[in-house]
Image (tube, rainbow, N blue to C red):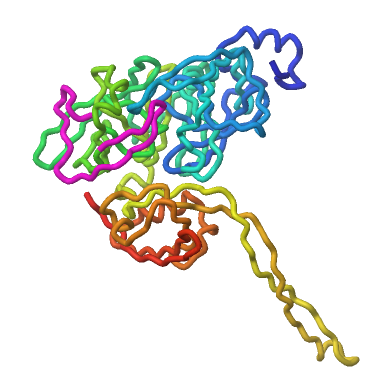
Amino acid sequence: MNRILLFISLFFITFLQSQSKFQFFRNSEKEEVGFKLINNLIVFPLSINGKELSFILDTGVRKTILFNLTNKENLVLNNTEKVFIRGLGIGNPVEAILSKRNEIRIKNIFGTNQEVYVILDDAFKLSSKMGTTIHGITGYDLLKDVIVKVNYETKKLTFYKPETYQEPKCRSCEKLDIELYNNKPYINLQIRTEKTSEEIPVKMLIDSGGSDALWLFEGTEKDIKCPEKYFIDILGEGLSGTIYGKRSRVENVAIGKYMVEKPTASFLDSLSTFNARKYKKRNGSIGGGILKRFKVWIDYPNKRLILKKATSLKKGFYYNMSGLHVVYNGLELIKEEMNIPRKSHYGDDVSSNNVISFVTSYTYKFKPSYKVERVVEDSPADKAGIEVGDIIKKINGKNAHEYTLEHITDLFQTKPNKKITLVVERGVVELKYKFKLEQRI
C-alpha cells in the first residue's frame, strides 16, 4: 500500500490499515469539495492510492467502480482477483478485477482497506459522452460513513462527520425517510401519469448517477403505463449493455410537500431492467434532472433525505429536441490567426509620427472535436439529413471547438422551435444543415 501522508505517524498508519470505513482526520468535522455538474451528474475529485481521479457520485451503485484507466494513469491496485458483475442492460455479466486493501481519500476523509472493482472493457465510453475524463463511480461504500450536502447551484459537496452532524433547521425543507435495500436508497413518492389518472404511490430509487428526471417501470403491480405520446430511444448504458425505453412525460410528481410539474419520464422495457426489477417494490428511479432543482442532504447513517427547493424548481423539463447524440472525438489541431502590433517611428518627432501596423502570424493549438454518435429516427436532425459519424465544425456560426460538450447538450434542450445551424465534415466535404428544435412529447 502506498504511503498515506507524510504528516501521519507510523502509529496512525497502523491504526488506519485496520479500518474498513471512511473517517475524518486532523480534527475535521466536515470537508467541502467543488464538483462539476455535467449532464446532471456530479463529477468530483477523489484519490485512490495517492492518484487523483475524477468520479461520479452515484447513489444508485453499491461499490466503487473504475472503468477508464490507461497505461498513462500509473495507478497501483492491490490484491487483485478476477470477478464478473452484472447491472442494467440486456447483455451478459462483464469481466472485472476486484482489488482489495486500497486507500481512498477525499481531502481529510480517508477510507482504508477499500474494495475497488475495475471493468476491463470500457463499454460505457462515458468520458467521450461527457466531454471530460471520468475514471469511475462511487456510491454506498462512501456514503454509508458520511453525510453529504449537494448544492447544485454553487456546485459544492459538503461531507459531514455523522457523530457531530446537526440536521438543518429549515421550515421550508422536506424531510423524507430513506429505505436502504441491498445498500441502495429508496423513497416513497406519488406520481400522476396523465390528467385523468389518479395519483399512484411509488417507491423510487434515489439515483444521483442518472441524468434523467424520472425512470419508471411499466407493468409493475402499480399498473404504471406510458402516456400515449412517446418516442423510442436509447436511454443509456448499463454494466450489462444498452438500456432501451420510451421517452415521455408525466403530469406531476409529489415529493412530500413539493409538487414537480410535467417532468420528463422514461419508461423502461422489462429486458433492460430485469435485474433492477428483482426488488419487487421498486417502481423506478428519481434522477439528476429533478434532484438538481433542490439543495439535497443525503444521510445514510440516519436514513434521511432532506430537500430544500432551489430557484430552478419551476423551470420546464425538456429532452434533447434535436435528435442528435454528440460525443467528444478527441483533439484536433486548429490553425488560429494572430495579429501582432508593431510600432514604426519616422522622423524626430516620435510622438506625432508613431505608426502602428499589424503583422499577421498563425499559431496551431489542439482543440476539442465533436462527432455525431447517433441520430434519433424521425427527429429534426434526421429529417435535415445529418448522419452518424459527421464531424461537427460549426454550431450557429460559432466554431464547434469553442463549445464544451455540456454547452452543446444544453443548447439542444433550450426551448422548442429554436433554430440550429450546423456545419459538418463528412469525408472530405463540408455540409451545412438547418433545423428547428422540436418537442415531440
Q: Give residue 55's position: percent from left, percent from top.
A: 53, 32
The residue located at (29%, 33%) in the rendering is 215
Q: Is residue 261 visible?
A: no
The residue located at (32%, 40%) in the rendering is 234
391 to the left or right of 277:
right
Q: How many marks?
A: 0
Toward the viewer: 60 or 314?
60
Query: For the view shown, which residue lies furthest in the right direction?
Result: 348
Locate the N terminus and report the quarter of the image it occupies: top right
**Magenta-colored span:** 217-245
Q: Give residue 387's position: percent from left, percent from top.
A: 38, 55
Residue 323: say if magenta.
no
400 to the left or right of 214:
right
Query: For the view shown, which residue lies furthest in the front direction?
Result: 428
Q: Give residue 407's position: percent from left, percent from top.
A: 46, 53
Above or below — where is 337 with respect to 20?
below
